[in-house]
Image: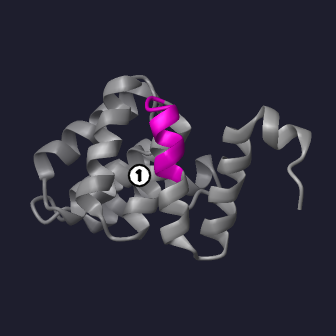
Amino acid sequence: APPTNSSRVFPFLSKLVSVHGFVANHKLGLATTALRSLSEQFPENPHLLLERATLDFDLGNLDDSLEILERLRTLYPRSVDGGDMQAMVLRIRENPTKLSRLARTLVRLAPNRPEPWIAIALDCSSDTKSHPKKALEHLSRVLHLHQHHTG
């Protein structure tokens, strides 16, 4: 199909739509390639950073995902976006000190968002704390705040 006017004027938007299409069709290699290309054009775009971190997480590239999420947190310290995923990586990587610090920071920033409470729940369920009842209480709070949150 010939390119539309919008794909010529906004090629980045067209590429971003392609990324989402690749992900939806489980073509993660193509999504990764397209997303990296976009990230080169817009290296500090929070949406693209979060998309890359999510894709790396889904592909099992936890170290890459964590690196991107930490960069996102450095660039946008008042944002909690992706904090739940960062907490999950820290939980998997068994880093309770960083997990506790992240959870406290997220709750301080946005107590009415679900991401901080997922981080708190993961922190409560860590091997060093092992408070499953508290973790479930925090997850219940997540559902109360946002019924469809998939964190």
Q: Is residue 86 magenta?
A: no
Q: Position of residue 95 (x, y in %)?
A: 13, 54
**Which residue type does callout 1 highlight?**
Ala
What residue is at 45 percent from the left and 41 percent from the top? 49
Residue 135 falls in image quadrant? bottom left
Q: Is residue 18 above or below residue 60?
A: above
Q: Is residue 39 magenta?
A: yes
Q: Which range of residues does the magenta coloring cover?
A: 35-44
Mark 1 residue element:
helix
What residue is at 28 percent from the left and 35 percent from the top? 104
Q: Position of residue 17 (x, y in %)?
A: 71, 52
Q: Which residue is mark 1?
A: 53
Report the magenta stretch's main SS.
Answer: helix
Q: Nearer the viewer, residue 123 or 11?
A: 11
What residue is at 35 percent from the left and 32 percent from the top? 73
Q: In the image, 92: left or right of 81? A: left
| Residue 118 visible in the picture | no
| Residue 104 visible in the picture | yes
Q: Is residue 12 above or below residue 144?
A: above
Q: Position of residue 19 (x, y in %)?
A: 62, 57
Query: In the displayed image of the protein, which residue is found farthest to the bottom?
Result: 26
Q: In the image, 53: left or right of 123? A: right
Q: In the image, 117: left or right of 64? A: right
Disc 1: CA contacts within 10 A as few (<14), some (14-19) or many (>=20): many
Q: Position of residue 23 (x, y in %)?
A: 60, 67
Split into 4 quadrants, where in the image is the N terminus? bottom right
What residue is at 45 percent from the left and 56 percent from the top? 54
